[in-house]
Amino acid sequence: MATATLAAAAPFLPTPPPAAARARTRSRRRTTRPFLRAACAYALQEGQSRRFHRLPCGLDLEVIAQPAPAPGERPPLVFVHGSFHAAWCWAEHWLPFFSRAGFPCYALSLRAQGESSVPQEAVAGTLETHTGDIADFIQKEVPSPPVLIGHSFGGLIVQQYISRLQGSELHPKLAGAVLVCSVPPSGNSGLVWRYLLTKPVAAVKVTLSLAAKAYANSLSLCKETFFSPQMDDGLVLRYQALMKESSKLPLFDLRKLNAALPVPSVPDNTTEILVMGASNDFIVDSEGLSETSRFYGVQPVCVEGVAHDMMLDCSWEKGAEIILTWLEKLTP
């Protein structure tokens, strides 16, 4: 409806100003409004609020928060999304679920994602910038050490955060970390080569869906990439639309990302870590899950009957229940 209205109004718009005037206007805009904010319309649920965390560089990060119903001693949960997603992907199911269980919840949209600010220079983030942004938010707005929960490439960001904990005053300590269908510490190159050698048809589909962003215009490809076959098509279309609007810039500059990998090992790691995968994951295979679990010396948990977007899938409760059980065992 909005598109039709704008199109109808176009003939009545004023004549564009001369080039010199346009240049002066652009200059004024750069001075008075250095950052643009991405638009991703997600209607919050009851009990949720949206605010913006101002980074030292001047960018604003979108935060969707949902407090626990009553004050308690349970650690806060901070959620970090992956590519083509934003804070909304956690707000749909997992924020209400963990809030009801007594955990204060915060879901972040990384820079240029969701409704977070877009850098004026239009440069994609790096592992270091994203990790630093999360550290700044935790340091200034989270009252006690949180559990950091990352999905897909967000899981790689969480791994980088863990590697920076020792000897760094800039990275507040954590109560724990959960890696959900996470890209392994070496990155996604191993995943790509395994697909090319063993599942070439799947490799082509993944490349089209993610690298060429074909998921955005194909219901079937979006469903196969992120969700279970049983997922309702109407929900897939809704999430597909949110994904299309979520990412104004790539989450990473891949050349810089590959140069920064693998994630540094942590010989004396004291952070409790849960490594979770999904049996129907079309992106992160079982070897990728095993690599991550070996890296941290933990036993992986593979959730049966769910796909890559575990927090949005039709059986989203399965992963949430496993995380809740693990959280209950964390030492206060």
Image (cartoon, helix red, strand yellow):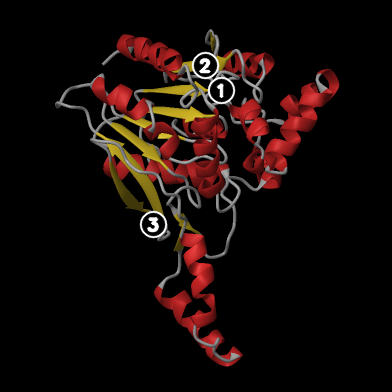
Are the residues at dot 1 and dot 2 in contact (C-beta closer than 8 Å)? yes
Q: How many circles with numbers are drawn on the protein? A: 3
Location of residue 187 (image quadrant): top right
Q: Position of residue 171 (x, y in %)?
A: 40, 38
Location of residue 32 (image quadrant): bottom left
Q: Please, is residue 53 above or below residue 169 in the view?
A: below
Q: Which mark is residue 276?
A: 2
- Alpha-carbon span between mark 3 and mark 2: 33 Å
Q: Secondary structure at mark 1?
A: loop
> Which amino acid, mark 1?
Cys
Q: Is residue 163 visible?
A: no
> Which amino acid, mark 2?
Met
Residue at the extreme left of the image, as rendered: 70
Q: Which mark is residue 181?
A: 1
Q: Name the residue nearer the viewer: 216 or 212.
A: 216
Q: Earlier in the sequence, mark 1 or mark 3?
A: 3
Seen in the image, is 118 located left or right of residue 255?
Answer: left
Q: Name the residue nearer the viewer: 140 or 11.
A: 11
Which numbered disc, 1 or 3, marks the residue closer to the eye?
1
Q: Which mark is residue 56?
A: 3
